[in-house]
């Protein structure tokens, strides 16, 4: 995986999380209604998660700007992806997970693997100063 690919991955991840957070922040009620998902007893639960996604999106943009220099942020992104994928998969398998949340679990699982590969590549780049963008 080249540094250019890593930069592109984290731009996509930043847009993905920021826009999902923004969408759930402003249109969560409409999304839940359209997907026949029961409304939460208080929207602060959804709004807080939405704002967290937007913050992580901004963090991913920082990684995209300088993947090697901001390599230490990548594990936090991996933890986000593990958290969501793990919870969604658990409920998907054991009880029920509304369809609205299933595609995000699959996409986040793929991103988790890609983040791990990017993290490993950036570690390799730190060990080899003066290497080119390969």
Image: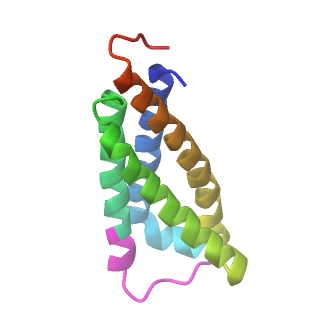
* Residue shown at the point (49%, 83%) measured from the top left: 39
* Residue shown at the point (40%, 42%) measured from the top left: 14
- Image: magenta residue range: 35-48
Can you give x and y, in whole percent of width and height, for residue 87 in the image? 55, 72
Q: Nearer the viewer, residue 7 or 17?
A: 7
* Residue shown at the point (30%, 45%) measured from the top left: 58
From the viewer's perspective, is 68 left or right of 102? left
Can you give x and y, in whole percent of width and height, for residue 65 in the image? 31, 28
36 drawn magenta: yes
Toward the bottom, the furthest residue is: 41
Q: Is residue 124 above or below residue 50?
A: above
From the viewer's perspective, is 99 left or right of 58? right
5 drawn magenta: no
Q: Is residue 58 above or below residue 118?
A: below
Q: Is residue 127 above or below residue 48?
A: above
Asked if one can make out residue 18 in the rendered structure from this viewpoint, the answer is: no
Asked if one can make out residue 47 in the rendered structure from this viewpoint, the answer is: yes
């Amino acid at each position: 995986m080249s540094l250019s690919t890593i930069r592109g991955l984290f731009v996509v991840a930043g847009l993905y999380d920021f826009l999902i957070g923004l969408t759930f922040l402003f249109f969560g009620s409409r999304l839940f209604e359209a997907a026949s998902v029961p409304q939460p007893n208080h929207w602060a639960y959804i709004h807080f998660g939405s704002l967290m996604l937007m913050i992580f999106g901004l963090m991913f943009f920082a990684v995209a700007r300088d993947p090697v220099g901001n390599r230490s942020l990548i594990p936090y992104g991996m933890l986000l992806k593990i958290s969501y994928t793990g919870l969604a998969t658990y409920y998907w398998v054991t009880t029920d997970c509304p369809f609205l949340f299933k595609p995000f679990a699959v996409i986040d699982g793929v991103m988790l693997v890609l983040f791990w590969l990017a993290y490993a590549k950036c570690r390799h780049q730190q060990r080899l100063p003066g290497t080119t963008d390969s």
